[in-house]
Amino acid sequence: MTDLVGFVRAALDEDRAFDDVTTKGIVPAEARGRATIAAGQPGVIAGTEAAGVAFRLLNPRCEIAVLAEDGAVVGAGDVVMVIDGTTRGLLSAERVALNFLQRLSGIATLTAAFVDAVRGTRARILDTRKTTPGWRALEKYAVRMGGGANHRMDLSEMALIKDNHLAAVGDVGIAVARVRGLLPKGAEVEVEADTLPQVEAALIAGADRILLDNMTLDEMRAAVELVGGRARLEASGGVTLGRVRAIAETGVDDISVGALTHSAPALDLALSIEPR
């Protein structure tokens, strides 16, 4: 993210963290404390930089020790971060810092579970554009911290010709030719296919990637045999932890999982403060 400080500042402003009436009314300005953030469950950490920015914006002279860097696997009870600073700053930044850390660590943790499930196959786990508005760069970063790979960041990065696009033009060959004229050099064209005849048509049209949408395992295996490595194949739709291994074993190259960013539960992380 190009302006992480501004993004975190906006979150603090939303929370009115600089006008925390409870903390200002109770805690003396000169009081100092040590905050410890620890994991309440096993997981993969992401978001320590954003959390650190939240604390520093409210307490510029605080000292931060990151004991579990982004991408690290933690167990229940493991300490992730320790922050020394004014007690007021620690209390007022707590919720926003934890929001970043828990949300992003939840995404990294869920991604790691999918990556582990397909280990030993050729398949990569990809995210999608089903992200929280405004959070895309951070959420896709969290996917990488969990061992996944990013699909396109936005609509300009590569072309993905879906069924509604094809309905508008009527011919996949025309669609691929038209979009290639607008793409930057080296950018790929992907075509969505619901059936094996559509896979063959996308291949003939010169698609670099073909998205196998909601296909059965038998259909995916047939698509892999049909394409024979001439285009990357991406499985999408109905992907769960219980099913992803079977999908990977069909021989597809990529498996996209919208749940990584739209349904990941927050990782259980808690902050405790001791006076100094």
Image (cartoon, grey):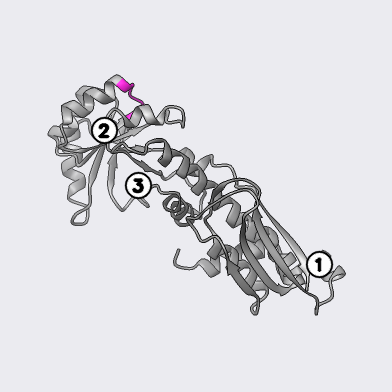
Quarter of the figure that contains the N terminus:
bottom left
Horizontally, is 214 left or right of 199 in the view? right
| Helix, strand or loop for the magenta stretch, by majority | loop
The residue positioned farthest toward the right in the image shown: 26
Q: CA distance from mark 1 to mark 2?
A: 57 Å
Q: Quadrant of residue 98?
A: bottom right
Disc 1 target residue? 23
Using the image, tell me which numbered label, if any, was put on residue 166: 2
Where residue 247 sits in the image (x, y, percent)?
A: 35, 29
Amino acid marked by disc 2? Leu
Chain part drawn in magenta = 213-217
For the point 59% across and 69% down, the residue is 65
Residue, x 72% and y 71% (percent of image)?
89
In the rendering, at what x and y percent does residue 268 appear?
Answer: 64, 48
Measured as percent of width and height from the top left, residue 144 is found at 41, 52
- Sooner in the amino-acid sequence: mark 1 or mark 2: 1
Q: Is residue 234 left or right of residue 22?
A: left
Nearest to N terminus: mark 3 or mark 1: 1
What residue is shown with label 3?
151
Q: Quick check: can you spot residue 101? A: yes
Specify the amino acid type for callout 3: His
